[in-house]
Image (cartoon, rainbow, N blue to C red):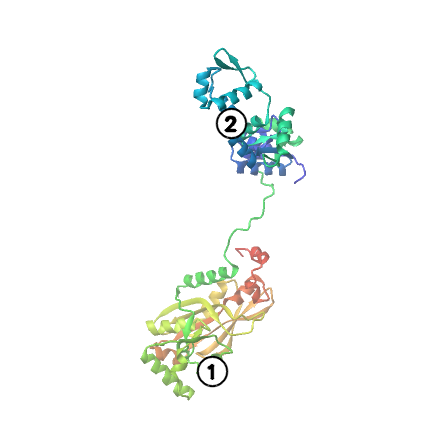
């Protein structure tokens, strides 16, 4: 609860004002507030908490004892309704006098039962004989509050507040409660709400305010709300997509499970290359691809491997299914299917490497990859494209380093300077697809290609020094990452 400070009545919510006005005559219960304000119970509870926080009301809790009919009490009433004396009294049905013949007929009692009933009720002072009939006495409605009458009242009202009963009624219920499960007696805590001294001091001002007049207190405390949002890494993925689409590229996609032909062979990776071993690749056990590719393309790839790598190429190795180790299978299959003379496409997706998890390596991560096909495209065009992409990602200093990749020649490694780290960082690999990659699938024009992991860009963007932090799901970090940077 905040300390008392001056509250401008104009800043109070309409719900708060209604509650304050309803408390003008003194303390009331929550149910009374609902009735007086004509608000629903949730609105009243909310308003009460707002006002309590502002020290404008106080809540007093007290325990009240309630009574209700017990299991044995139900049985007693059921049986008592059938007694002759009660049947006789019920037979009057609003009358004050009946002849004996009328009384016998209306009560449907035998001669013996009627005699017994008349005798008992006469002794109780409820009826008296008058000529040839029976008259109710004035004591009938003012008879002593006995146990039977107490049980009937309890059944009718279902619940009675014990604390509000007069002394003679309490004694009757105390007697019943000592006889087992005839009645239930239980405490219940009730809350009474009243204006505090501070609330009383602004009551007149609140009452004088027009119903619709309210100003906002822009200095008031507001709770921090953690709204639902995308994961920061997904924001990077979306940003990369938006940049390439803005540069005129078309997105392509493909399955995460690939056969060895498209993941390795079509990319001029020999079948005895270490990358194809179990230590580096996740294979799908017990499954093989039936048709890996068009027969002409298979023959072209097999010939290239035999000629340049000097070994006998095996279709069995090409049939093995793997979790793709890069997104390049999607790219090369696009080239094989479309055989474009000109194209600008990219793909973003998950790739899998059988690597030990470290602060800079994951077994599963995002990779972005793209190609540009054209008759006159050059390595200079590729460097310019990469420079523009990095610039849009906020990385202004870029340089390129000669490198080696199995299926591009020439090949480069892009480097970006990170201001906060104060050093150059390796990012995407790039180059021009070798003829041994493009010619077997029917593409004759040069193909510029690049690719790299997005987690490394995310680390630079968010200032992380351990890539595993992106997947740790720490709420503190997830909530602290700004959406706009």
Quadrant housing the N terminus: top right
Residue 87: x and y in percent read 49, 24
Image mark count = 2
Q: Quadrant of residue 143?
A: top right
Q: Residue at x 44, y 69 (%)?
A: 369
**Nearest the camera: 305 or 198?**
198
Residue 411: x and y in percent read 47, 77
Residue 367: x and y in percent read 47, 68
Q: Quadrant of residue 409?
A: bottom left
Graded by Cα atoms within 10 Å as few (under 14), some (14 to 19) or many (20 or more), the crowding at tag 1 reads few
Residue 372 at least partly seen: yes
User: 46 above or below 347?
Assistant: above
Label whose residue precedes the other's in the sequence (1 or 2): 2
**Nearest the camera: 106 or 421?**
106
**Nearest the camera: 443 or 417?**
443
Graded by Cα atoms within 10 Å as few (under 14), some (14 to 19) or many (20 or more), the crowding at tag 2 reads few
Q: Which mark is on residue 83?
A: 2
Q: Residue at x 49, y 81 (%)?
A: 274
Query: Which residue extends farthest front?
Result: 112
Residue 62 lies left or right of residue 294; in this view the side is right
User: 266 above or below 369?
Assistant: below
Q: Which mark is on residue 60?
A: none
Q: Quadrant of residue 286?
A: bottom left
Report which residue position mark 1 lands on: 273
Mark 1–mark 2 Cα distance, whole angstroms, equals 103 Å
User: 280 above or below 218?
Assistant: below
User: 65 above or below 355?
Assistant: above
């Amino acid at each position: 609860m905040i300390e008392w400070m001056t509250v401008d009545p104009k800043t109070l919510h309409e719900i708060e004002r209604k509650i304050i006005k309803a408390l003008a005559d003194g303390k009331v219960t929550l149910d009374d507030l609902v009735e007086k304000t004509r608000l629903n119970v949730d609105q009243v509870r909310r308003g009460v908490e707002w006002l309590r926080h502002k020290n404008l009301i106080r809540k007093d809790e007290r325990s009240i004892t309630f009574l209700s009919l017990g299991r044995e009490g139900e049985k007693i009433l059921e049986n008592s309704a059938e007694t002759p004396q009660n049947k006789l009294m019920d037979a009057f049905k609003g009358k004050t006098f009946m002849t004996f013949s009328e009384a016998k007929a209306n009560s449907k009692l035998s001669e013996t039962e009627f005699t017994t009933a008349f005798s008992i009720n006469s002794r109780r002072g409820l009826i008296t004989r008058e000529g040839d009939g029976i008259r109710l006495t004035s004591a009938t409605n003012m008879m002593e509050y006995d146990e039977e009458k107490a049980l009937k009242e309890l059944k009718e009202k279902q619940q009675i507040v014990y604390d509000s009963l007069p002394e003679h009624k309490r004694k009757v219920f105390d007697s019943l409660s000592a006889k087992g499960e005839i009645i239930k007696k239980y405490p219940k805590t009730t809350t009474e709400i009243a204006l505090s001294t501070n609330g009383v001091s602004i009551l007149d001002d609140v009452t004088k305010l027009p119903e619709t007049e309210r100003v906002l207190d822009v200095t008031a405390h507001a709770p921090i709300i953690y709204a639902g949002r995308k994961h920061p890494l997904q924001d990077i993925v979306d940003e990369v997509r938006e940049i390439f689409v803005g540069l005129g590229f078309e997105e392509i996609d493909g399955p995460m499970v690939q056969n060895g032909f498209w993941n390795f062979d079509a990319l001029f990776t020999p079948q005895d290359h270490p990358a194809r071993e179990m230590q580096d690749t996740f294979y799908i056990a017990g499954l093989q691809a039936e048709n890996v590719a068009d027969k002409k393309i298979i023959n072209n790839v097999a010939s290239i491997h035999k000629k340049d790598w000097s070994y006998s190429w095996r279709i069995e190795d090409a049939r093995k299914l793997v979790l793709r180790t890069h997104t390049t299978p999607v790219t090369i299959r696009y080239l094989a299917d479309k055989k474009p003379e000109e194209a600008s496409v990219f793909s973003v997706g998950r790739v899998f490497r059988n690597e030990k998890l470290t602060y800079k390596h994951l077994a599963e991560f995002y990779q972005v990859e793209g190609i540009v096909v054209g008759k006159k495209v050059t390595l200079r065009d590729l460097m310019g494209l990469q420079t523009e992409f990095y610039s849009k990602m906020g990385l202004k200093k870029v340089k390129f380093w000669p490198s080696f990749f199995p299926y591009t020649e020439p090949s480069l490694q892009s480097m970006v300077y990170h201001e906060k780290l104060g050093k150059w960082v390796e990012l995407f690999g790039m180059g021009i697809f070798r003829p041994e990659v493009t010619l077997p699938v029917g593409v004759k024009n040069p193909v510029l290609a690049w690719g790299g992991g997005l987690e490394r860009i995310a680390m630079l963007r968010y200032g992380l020094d351990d890539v595993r932090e992106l997947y740790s799901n720490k709420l503190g970090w997830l909530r602290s990452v700004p959406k706009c940077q």
